[in-house]
Image (cartoon, coloured by chain):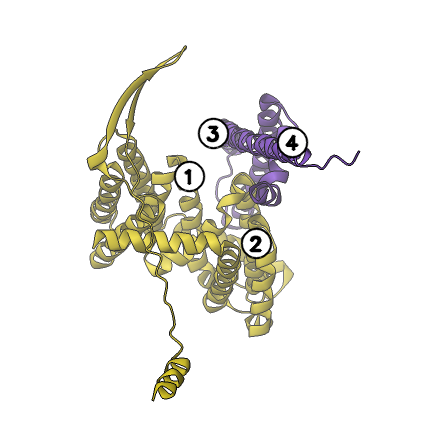
Chain colours: A yellow, B purple
Amino acid sequence: MLSNLILIREILLKLYKKYDIYFNVAFKFFFALIVFTQINSSFGYAAVLKKSPVVILLSIIAVLIPQIWFVLLVGIFSIINIFFLSTEMAIITGILMLVIFLMYVRMTPSRGYLLIAIPLLFKLNFIVAVPIALALFSSPASVLVVVVGTLMYYFGLEIPNIALYKSTELSDLPNVLIDMYKYLVSNFLGNKQMILSILVFIAIAVIVYIIRSLRIDYNHYIAIAAGTITNLVFYIIGNLILKAGISVPRVLFASLIGGIIAMVIQFMRFYVDYHRTESVQFEDDDYYYYVKAVPKIKVTAPNKKVSKINTRSFRSNQQEDN
Amino acid sequence: MTKLAIYEKRIGKEDFAINEYFKGDYILINNIWTRVSVTVSCAILFTCYILMQIFLFLSDDVAFDIYGLAVGCITIYIGLMIVYSIFSTDIYRRKYKDSQRRLSSYNDLLISLNETKKENEVGLNAIKPDID
């Protein structure tokens, strides 16, 4: 069973290495297509942006541009959509996106796709896998992308509600902005679910990072399990304290799915054989080394050759014999 | 050759640009840009916040504490500056280190390519017919 899984992994990696250009192009295109479609379904107020040729054209553009430009494209796409609903809301969204861009995206442009993906993963209940995977393969500070993405997701949920405040004349504008501000302070910044989610994700990242840094066998898998349990326990406790109104079965489902996805990502990244762990010691001019080496398991796919027997020539030979 | 071409096409340009700087200079320049970004972001957010407080003061007659507001804004700004300077230094130090690592393996590949080329040339000279 396990050897079959390793074999499948090797085949998939080999296929990816062989056709990585095509895979990357297809990934970028379909990812952009899903993002634009989701934005349209959530707050698609601009009829022109909902048309399929426009969405496909934008997805093709997304394939050709770097990640940082893609983030900008998604931001502009969202602002135009919101502009058709409410000018004030579009201005507020534009300001917030500019701040996010300056304070986060500019510094870590390689996390652009992940930042855009987080609201989608939230919707699909797959979000738990992100802080676990980030802490497994990067530093705990990288959880910042999850925090920013979470803020974006909850802000997106509030857009239709905030946009209900509309000014008919220019003189109404200050009053409408005040109403929007009050709504944002009470409902967005005071959103208990959002605050709890951010705290839980930070806790997951810290715990997973500490465990995966320990020099113990199966540390990566123990870290994933700890991250999953942290999500479940912290959400339940936080829910009781803050009365955030989070459904426990949903949290359980999200934790399990997140843990499984993190496990798959870990398995695809590397799989090691702890039974063959070697501890070696050596020295050079400057240091003495204590090294623990755990070999990676690699299985070579059997090279099957199918030789075709030409049936026609076989039959004709038979007829000649007769 | 293929590995070199792939590297040059994907991240080579960025690494060559980073390699133009010394480590300290690269981190310093990017830290300055980070601080400019934080300053602009804070200016935008604080302007919006102060405007809202003025609107609230005018419409709802909510108390407008200029001193408290100024102290709050400056404290947040300094706090963000410190946090972002630490993060930025860490991020760009790692970026520089990664680019140096990649450039080092790129140089190794170039050296091995050069050696192969020399070996081929020697081989070709050895089998060259003596025309004279």
Q: In the rendered view, does A271 fall on the left or right side of A160?
A: left
Q: In the rendered view, does B128 fall on the left or right side of A52?
A: right
Residue B26: image x %, image y %?
A: 60, 27
In space, the residues marked 3 and 1 are separated at their CA atoms by 14 Å
The numbered disc on residue A142 is 1
Q: Label 3 sits on what residue type?
A: Val
Q: Label 2 sits on what residue type?
A: Phe
Q: Which residue is mark 3?
A: B83
Tell me if residue B57 can be seen.
Answer: no
The numbered disc on residue A70 is 2
Q: Which residue is mark 4?
A: B122
Q: Label 1 sits on what residue type?
A: Ser
- For residue A309, what is the image quadrant? bottom left
Q: Are marks 4 and 1 on the same chain?
A: no
Q: Label 4 sits on what residue type?
A: Val
Q: State the SS at label 2.
A: helix
